[in-house]
Amino acid sequence: MSANNPIIKKQEMKANSKVEDIYRLEDEIRGVVMDFYQGDLDLMILAVHEILVNAAEHGNQLLSEKILKVKILITREYIKVIIRDEGEGFDWCKVAMDNPGEPLDESRLTGERGRGIALTRECCDRLWYNEKGNEAYLLFKRDF
Amino acid sequence: MNIKKEENRALIKPGERVDFNNAHEFKEGLMSILGDYEEIIIDFEGVKSIDSAGLGKILMFQKRVKENDGSLKIINVESDYVRKMFKMIHLNKIIAIEGF
């Protein structure tokens, strides 16, 4: 985020790690970004869904009291969605970066945590995590 | 989820969502008819969304059906969203999908 690319909208939200709360978060995120994104909003929400589900299932172990935190930063050039869970993290370099660029196949869609990540990578411009692996960053370039 | 069993074929109709929330139940439904029918059809009428958990179960099931010399087909994909997901992972190259 440089002086040439200032944040024009910022929104934070949180939810418990429950199924209905995940669906609600997705609807809220859709509402925040819809006026700013000219790409395929369905694919963006699918990417967000996959990471939220991973965070709730693997990070927060579906313990409803554990919190999912979402931060959305919108600039002229991109939309960044940050999703944080309360878990211990994971070796995201190993899971997320296996076979980059190769088409999705059964082995990558039937695995556990890698499955959602593989699909997410198809739907966003960039995906990475913090070092611990409990905070995901999804970047979507805005089309003009 | 609804399963209709006929002489040589079975038809499965999942609920509105095929996702992480019901993927386990969906898998159990699919596995309950594995090996008993020559033809298995998944009817997507009324299905509005699917995620990687649901797609993973379908791919897993296709493999099992193939191992059992059966055939699997998907019909009535009405939702644009679901259609988009199938196209994105090129599911039609692996499973016969009506209208693709």
Image (tube, rainbow, N blue to C red):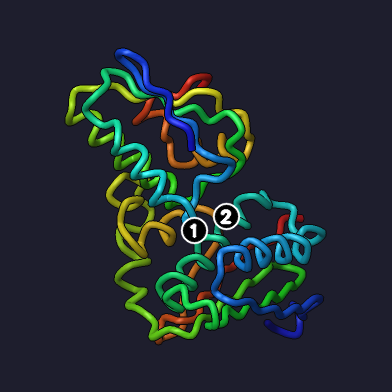
Tag 1 and tag 2 share a subunit: yes
Specify the amino acid type for callout 1. Answer: Thr
Marks 1 and 2 close (CB-CB < 8 Å): yes
Identity of the residue drawn at 23% across and 35% down: B64
Identity of the residue drawn at 31% across and 45% down: A106
Work out whether A26 lies above or below A56. Answer: above
Q: Residues within 10 Å of mark 2 (few under 14, many from 20)?
A: many
The x and y percentages for residue A107 are 27, 50
Decide if residue B31 is on the left or right side of residue A137: left
Specify the amino acid type for callout 2. Answer: Leu
Q: Quadrant of the N terminus of chain A?
A: bottom right
Residue hosting label 2: A46
Pinpoint the chain carrying mark 1: A
Work out whether A38 lies above or below A72. Answer: above
The x and y percentages for residue A69 are 61, 80
The disc at residue A83 is none
Residue hosting label 1: A120
